[in-house]
Image (cartoon, rainbow, N blue to C red):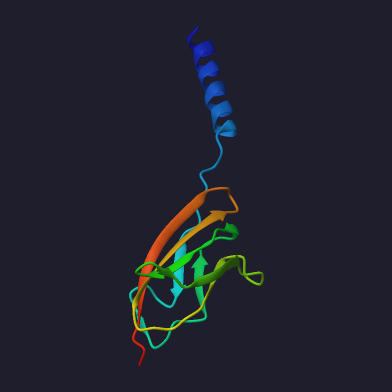
Amino acid sequence: MTRTIRTAALGAAAMLAVAAPAAMPHAELVKTTPKAGSTVKKLPRVITLTFGEAIGRAYPATVRHDTMNHATRTRVNPRNRRQVQIFTSGNMAETFTVRWRVLSVDGHGVRGAFRFRVSGR
């Protein structure tokens, strides 16, 4: 009887191990250009977010100071699917907050924000 229970338990454990999906990491932001917390002379025409894995979809991002959004377009870089490009317009000495949201290729949504400053000099 003990042997039967042990065999059944091992069989059940093996089935769970096969059925359980491997844990996949979500897309992690590994680099921003400009760097988070940095000061640049002028607002870059393109802000680049680099992730640790390929991105399936980039949702419209915002590049704000006060209530004004300077982001004009957001896309996954067609030459490097680990990068999201945020195109901007305008130029003023302000602190900007970049808010982004992406869908990784594994289907998980990830969002975040960072700040940088434009000195105007």
Task: Relative to 48, say whether 40 is above or below.
Answer: below
User: Which residue appears farthest toward the top when viewing the image?
Assistant: 1
Q: Residue furthest bottom?
A: 121
Q: Is residue 70 above or below residue 112?
A: below
Q: Position of residue 81 (x, y in %)?
A: 62, 65
At which x and y percent is residue 88? 51, 76
Q: Is residue 58 left or right of residue 41?
A: right
x and y percentages locating residue 95 in the rendered image? 33, 76
Tally the numbered discs.
Answer: 0
- Vertical relation: 106 (above or below) 5: below
> In this rendering, would 1 be left or right of 121?
right
Residue at the spot x=39%, y=88% of the render? 41
Q: Nearer the viewer, residue 40 or 54?
A: 40
- Of 18 and 49, the residue lying toward us: 49
Q: Residue furthest right?
A: 78
At 58% from the left edge and 27% from the top edge, which residue is drawn? 15
Q: Is residue 85 visible?
A: no
